[in-house]
Image (spheres, helix red, strand yellow):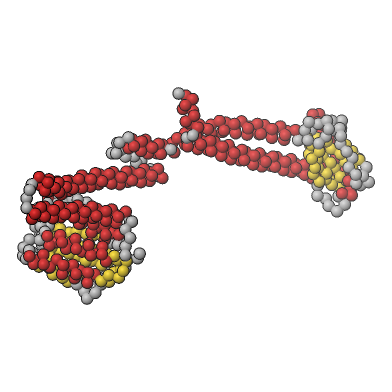
């Protein structure tokens, strides 16, 4: 079990993030320590050189105040005892001859500089150099400086203390770096696990949903970070998927319900034709009824396909310039006989012309479906009014009736496929007309609004952009 867990752990994002974090942390810490070490070494060297320059200036003052004897006395004092192993002095005269020096037995390998006086002929600036003597473990920092005209003093100082200090500093850096690297892994693992906690919650939720628990949602923390945004987006996606699934189930149920009745009638007509020996006229009537039911089925299926095509964005519009006034006039002329039979008045309030860019056939079906509903659900002596407002960028074509009206609870559902209000079930229809109208209007970049009051009528407003690009 442990081996399997370790094998699975190798492929986790948390482990990769931990390794990246630990690696970057270690490299950055190493670079920072290396830079700090170089800066400290430079500061120590500069301090040593500054001390040597001050010593040259001090011996120049001794030369001015007490002459050569004072200089030799100070050289002996500064190098007596254990200091003889840490510092040495050598003094040359104007002719290049060595005038004085401290005990050099501990400084084997010192060379005699040639032309030392000539090197300071044009400048009094001290000369600094680092010496590596063969029998000394630590290097030596040396300075040549003029303390009197033609007289050059060399002071050499062991860098033992500096090198011991830098070695201790280096060991301290190594210890701190090792500690950082040792703790970098667990800290990186903790941070990676904490950062991925939201992703793991989403993964668990997705797994539960995969096993059929469609009501599960990811808990959104009130931190406002990227994971909260991901969780909210994921939940919105789940809500959308759930709504689509519910809609598909309802559509399937409604479709099955609406198909069952005409199919039953078709089957009954076929059985009657086969079992009864009726007249030819009766047989023709049954065949005609069967054909009518088949037409209804085909119309329902074709309408459902048209809605699906429009909602998916796959509908190919035949865009032309369409005069809405003319289109509405044709629809009114088509439904005028039906309105007269029901004693319903159709009134229009339209401008002379109003052109839009759209698919003429689909827009005709939109207006026809809304006008058909208005006439169908308006009682005798009622009125249907059609108005067109073209003053804004969005054209508003409203169809108002004095019919049955729609309750507020049903208003939010009337555009769903196969949905029919309780008061409209007595009329012929399949509940697809409004769904088709809304889908066609939206594919033109518009929308449909409804305002309805029970027993007072309804107003459906088609909103379309003045020009709709292909």
Residue at 14% over, 46% down: 267
**17 vs 470: above or below:** above
**387 vs 421: above or below:** below
Task: Classify the position of the C terminus by image quarter.
Answer: bottom left
Residue at 66% over, 34% down: 170
Of residue 413 and residue 226, the one placed in the foreground of this image is 413
Of residue 149 and residue 96, the one placed in the foreground of this image is 96
Q: Position of residue 350 (x, y in %)?
A: 19, 72
Q: Is residue 266 left or right of residue 205?
A: left
Q: Is residue 450 left or right of residue 20?
A: left
Q: Position of residue 154 (x, y in %)?
A: 84, 41
Of residue 369 and residue 296, the one placed in the foreground of this image is 296
Q: Is residue 203 visible?
A: yes
Residue at 23% over, 65% down: 364
Q: Is residue 28 left or right of residue 52?
A: left
Residue at 21% over, 54% down: 298
Q: Is residue 463 visible?
A: no
Task: Classify the position of the N terminus by image quarter.
Answer: top left
Q: Position of residue 465 (x, y in %)?
A: 29, 66
**14 vs 364: above or below:** above
- Quarter holding residue 214: top left
Outermost residue, bottom side: 352
Q: Position of residue 36 (x, y in %)?
A: 64, 40
How many marks the image carries: the answer is: 0
């Amino acid at each position: 079990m442990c081996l399997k867990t370790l094998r699975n752990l190798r492929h986790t994002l948390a482990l990769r993030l931990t390794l990246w974090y630990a690696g970057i942390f270690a490299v950055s810490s190493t670079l920072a320590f290396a830079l700090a070490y170089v800066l400290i070494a430079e500061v120590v060297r500069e301090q040593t050189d500054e001390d040597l320059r001050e010593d040259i200036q001090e011996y120049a003052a001794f030369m001015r105040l007490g002459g050569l004897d004072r200089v030799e006395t100070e050289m002996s004092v500064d190098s007596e005892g254990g200091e003889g192993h840490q510092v040495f002095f050598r003094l040359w005269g104007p002719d290049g001859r060595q005038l004085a020096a401290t005990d050099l037995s501990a400084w084997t390998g010192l060379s005699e500089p040639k032309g030392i006086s000539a090197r300071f002929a044009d400048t009094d600036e001290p000369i600094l150099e680092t010496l590596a003597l063969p029998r000394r473990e630590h290097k030596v920092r040396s300075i040549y400086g003029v303390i009197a005209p033609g007289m050059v003093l060399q002071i050499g100082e062991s860098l033992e203390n500096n090198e011991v200090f830098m070695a201790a500093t280096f060991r301290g850096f190594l210890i701190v770096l090792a500690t950082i690297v040792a703790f970098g892994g667990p800290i990186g693992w903790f941070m990676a696990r904490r950062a991925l906690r939201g992703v793991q919650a989403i993964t668990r939720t997705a797994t539960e949903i995969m096993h059929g628990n469609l009501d599960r949602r990811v808990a959104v923390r009130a931190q406002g970070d990227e994971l909260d945004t991901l969780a909210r987006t994921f939940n919105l996606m789940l809500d959308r998927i759930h709504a689509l699934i519910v809609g598909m189930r309802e559509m399937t149920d409604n479709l099955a319900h609406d198909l069952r009745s005409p199919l039953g009638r078709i089957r009954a007509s076929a059985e009657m034709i086969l079992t009864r020996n009726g007249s030819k006229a009766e047989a023709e009537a049954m065949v005609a009824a069967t054909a009518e039911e088949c037409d209804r089925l085909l119309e329902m299926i074709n309408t459902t396909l048209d809605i699906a095509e429009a909602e998916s964005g796959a509908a190919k519009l035949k865009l032309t310039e369409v005069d809405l006034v003319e289109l509405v006039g044709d629809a009114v002329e088509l439904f005028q006989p039906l309105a007269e039979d029901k004693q319903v008045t159709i009134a229009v309030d339209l401008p002379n012309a109003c052109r839009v860019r759209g698919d003429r056939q689909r827009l005709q079906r939109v207006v026809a479906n809304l006008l058909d509903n208005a006439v169908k659900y308006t009682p005798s002596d009622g009125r249907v009014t059609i108005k067109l407002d073209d003053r804004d960028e969005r054209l508003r074509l409203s169809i108002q009736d004095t019919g049955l009206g729609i309750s507020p609870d049903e208003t939010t559902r009337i555009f769903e496929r196969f949905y029919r209000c309780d008061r409209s079930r007595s009329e012929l229809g399949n509940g697809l007309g409004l769904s088709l109208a809304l889908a066609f209007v939206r594919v033109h970049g518009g929308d449909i609004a409804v305002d309805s009051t029970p027993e007072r009528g309804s107003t459906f407003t088609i909103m379309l952009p003045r020009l709709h690009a292909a």
